[in-house]
Image (cartoon, rainbow, N blue to C red):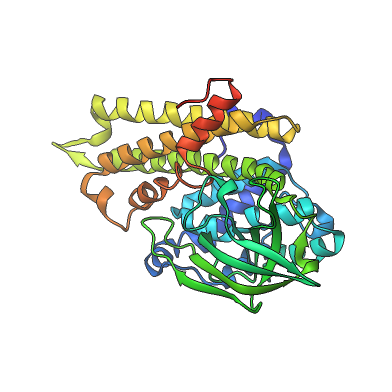
Amino acid sequence: MLDPFFDHYLDDSHRMFYETCLRFTEQELLPNAYEWEEAESFPIELYKKAADAGLMGADYPEDLGGGGGDVFHVILQCEAMMHCGSTGILAGLGSLGIALPPIRTLGTEDQKQRFIPPCLRGEKIAALAITEPGTGSDVAGVTTRATRQGDHYVLNGQKMFITSGARADFVSVLARTSDDPHGGLTFFVVEKGSPGFSVSRSLKKTGWRASDTAELVFEDCVVPVENRLGDEGSGFLALMKNFQFERLALAVYGHATAEVCLKEAEKYARQRKVFGKSVLSFQVTQHKLAAMATKTRAAKAFNYQVADAMRRGEEVIEAVSQAKNFASDVALEVADQAVQILGGMGYMRETVVERLYRDARLLPIGGGTREVMNEIICQLRGYPRAR
């Protein structure tokens, strides 16, 4: 149920879409989430089911096959689908949310039509490849190199921790086309089956288990010039724009995680008896839940405020960095307290709070670490560079 406190951000289209997402979650995700978590994968057919339900590309224009919505449609989808208790399912289904923006931003009309609509129809799977074994949040350190040879480029390098990397039909790859740390980065679309492109291995993770995460290898990989996105050197600015949305999405994962953990903890505390009384009847539990509810709402309010500014086209680099850090902290704390309230059951893999407790640990790491977010905040506030 939507919190009326946030009604002023939403209209009827948002509320109807939320109900659609919630029905899909209850019918398709919730009954299967535990099984898919244990299997560390979900069926590939789920992409088509989600697309048929109108859940792929809610914020993309209709002429590309999207829903024509805005950032709040994406936020509400995340909040509704998090009720399945598996961030990995959301991340796997939503990998197009970080893979397609470079195509949308830099691509020609032909490239957009080639790559975006098939993903929004659930027919193709897309992944974004930025991180490397030796380079994470510092994208200026990317070493994967693309060298032009006539009508094609040759890519050499590795990419690590790539969501949907093993099953992707194409990957938006950031590669170096010159030695300029920032101005030498360029995006390419590398399609499955391209000579020299391979999946080195699928990775085993602490959380987000239902999502496919892979290491990719490019060994003299041949990529046609028509698969370059934008001009050479245009990749860094496009990536910075992409990062803002990704960081907001991770912040939303944070408050949505906290909301579900709070709900599960409240439900268990009402039912569980200790010394003949419900756990909820003890003041220590009530105060714990009150603090969890307060921090959850605060994180959600911050995220909604940032999203609203983003919707208006305002600059949000500092705010979204702060929101991501704050929501990550709230998710970790609320999930931890929910596990404590559930006691032994909170430590069992069959419970939602146990899964989300593990999932939440990635939030201060993914999309730019907590430390990098703090560096961005310090720089934008004009602090002297630390030694």
Question: Would residue 199 appear left or right of 264 to someone viewing this image?
Answer: right
Above-or-below relation of 284 to 338: above
Does the rendering let one see residue 327?
no
The one nearer the camera, 242 or 138, is 138
Measured as percent of width and height from the top left, residue 382 is found at 59, 20
Residue pictured at 57% horizontal, 41% vertical: 247
Say whether residue 30 is left or right of residue 109: left
Query: Residue sitting at 36 percent across and 56 percent down?
Result: 206
Image quarter in which the C terminus is found: top left
Q: Is residue 106 above or below residue 47?
A: above
Looking at the image, which is closer to me, 143 or 35?
143
Q: In terms of depth relative to the viewer, which is nearer, 46 or 184?
A: 184
**307 on left or right of 278:** right
Image coordinates of residue 263 in percent, x first then y, are 41, 40
| Picture residue at 59% right of the left edge, 40% below the top | 248
Count of residue discs = 0
Q: In this orientation, which residue lies closer to the viewer: 91 or 218?
A: 218
Q: Quadrant of the N terminus?
A: top right
Q: Is residue 99 visible?
A: yes
Left or right? Give the position of 341 relative to 137.
left
Percent from the top left, x then y, of residue 201?
A: 45, 71
Q: Residue furthest left?
A: 275
Q: Position of residue 271 (x, y in %)?
A: 28, 42
Q: Residue at left 15%, top 37%?
A: 276
